[in-house]
Image: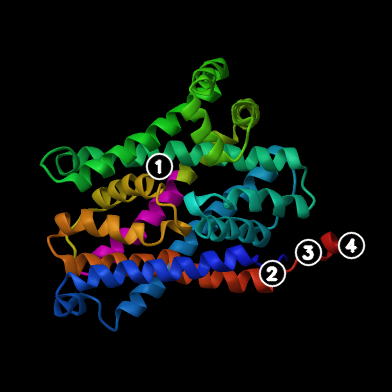
Amino acid sequence: MRNLSKKEWVNIILALVLGFVAVFFIFKGIDPREFFEYFRPQSLLHILLLCGIFLFSILIDSARMKWLFSFVWRKHLTLYDAFFNNYMSFLFSMLTPFYFGGQVFQTYHLSKLGFESEHNVNVILSRFVEYLISISILSVIGLWRYRDLFLSGTLMAPKLIFFAYLVSVSFIGIVILALIHPPFIAHLFGLLKRSRWMDSVIKKFTKKEDWDSRFLKWTHDLKESVKILWKSGFMILDFPLTLLSLLVQSLVFYLAIRFNFGNIGFIDATGLLFFLSMVVFYVPTPGASGGVEAVYQIVFSKILGSAGKTLASVLTWRLSTYYFPIFIGLLFLVFYRYPEEVKK
């Protein structure tokens, strides 16, 4: 298996440092006695339990991938290799800004296992669309139930959070519209291309001179990719499993709050988790480290009514679903070996 690059090691260190710095500054603003009233020695057992539940959500995604290859293309993918593929998708997404990198590794790994590249891209892009649709549906719950928090009052931070959410929803809407009607996207790109400052900004972000034609080609390929899987009937079965995996992840967040005596319902925790996940996407640090801690602290301090209780909950959740899983993933990366038939 390939080793981590120097840049990826730098991102690991940055993620740890930025997360520590964010927690340090949050901790300075609260009463330490209040924090340790909730974050106690048994919190380590809670973290291990929640980490196990989080890994179970990755196992669900792995089973989905195994069944997809078997159902659509009659190809055998072991559950072990599927689990490694999905776990590394999480790992490399968490080590790159804006969560890019995981899907690239997934296609690389499947190709190394001997699966056709067109099938690999098909699977990854189609699952990506499922994920976008699912988190959009779940995020609306959080916005609707806590709309007063984000839309009313004079505080600026909640309004900035809501603005970032609208940008995310717009992006997802564009991707879905591109699948339905690619010519509309071509017309939109033409308008953006004629605006010099927009063209320069997008070029700087994508580092591609022909960003418009590349994205248009990607939308065409994605449309054909999704069409193949939907015609097979598998996506109708797979979509509920996507929601199940996301609900297991939100269960971790819900339990992290309840273990620290936070009074919140599962539906509320789920809606807010995915609402805020679409916001912290724009934090330009590896895995949004630092930004996640800050944004969740701002929002949930108002909901839970206690800064100490909120920090204990957020820290329990982040250790369970980010820092510990990254460490486990690095060990997995070291010890993983390709099947013997692939080596030959």
- Magenta span: helix, strand or loop, mainly? helix
Q: What's the amino acid at mark 4? A: Lys
Spot occupied by residue 65 in the image (x, y as percentages of width and height):
61, 48
Secondary element type, mark 3: loop
Residue, far front: 196
Residue occupied by mark 4: 344
Report the front residue among 105 and 206. 206
Pointer 2 or 1: first along the chain: 1
Mark 2: amino acid: Tyr
Q: In the structure shown, which secondary structural element does the residue marked by tag 1 occupy?
A: helix
Q: Element type at marker 4?
A: loop
Q: Residue furthest right?
A: 344
**Relative to 63, residue 186 above or below:** above
Left or right: 115 as drawn, with respect to 9: right
Give the residue number, with chain letter if any, for mark 1. 135
Above or below for 150 versus 180: below
* Residue 238 in picture, x, y percent from top left: 53, 41
Mark 3 sits on what residue? Answer: 339
At x 68% / y 44%, what residue is drawn? 69
From which residue to which does the magenta span run? Answer: 243-260
Question: Residue at coordinates 60% horizontally, 74% vertically from top-left?
Answer: 331
Q: Which residue is mark 2?
A: 336
Of the image marks 3 and 1, the number of the one nearer the N terminus: 1
**Cβ atoms under marks 4 and 1 closer than 8 Å:** no
Circle 3 residues within 10 Å: few <14, some 14–19, many ≥20: few
Q: Position of residue 286 (x, y in %)?
A: 48, 59
Q: Secondary structure at mark 2?
A: loop
- In the drawing, does residue 340 fall left or right of residue 286? right
CA gap between label 3 and label 1 equals 34 Å
CB contact under 8 Å: marks 4 and 2: no
Label 4 to label 1, Cα distance in Å?
A: 41 Å
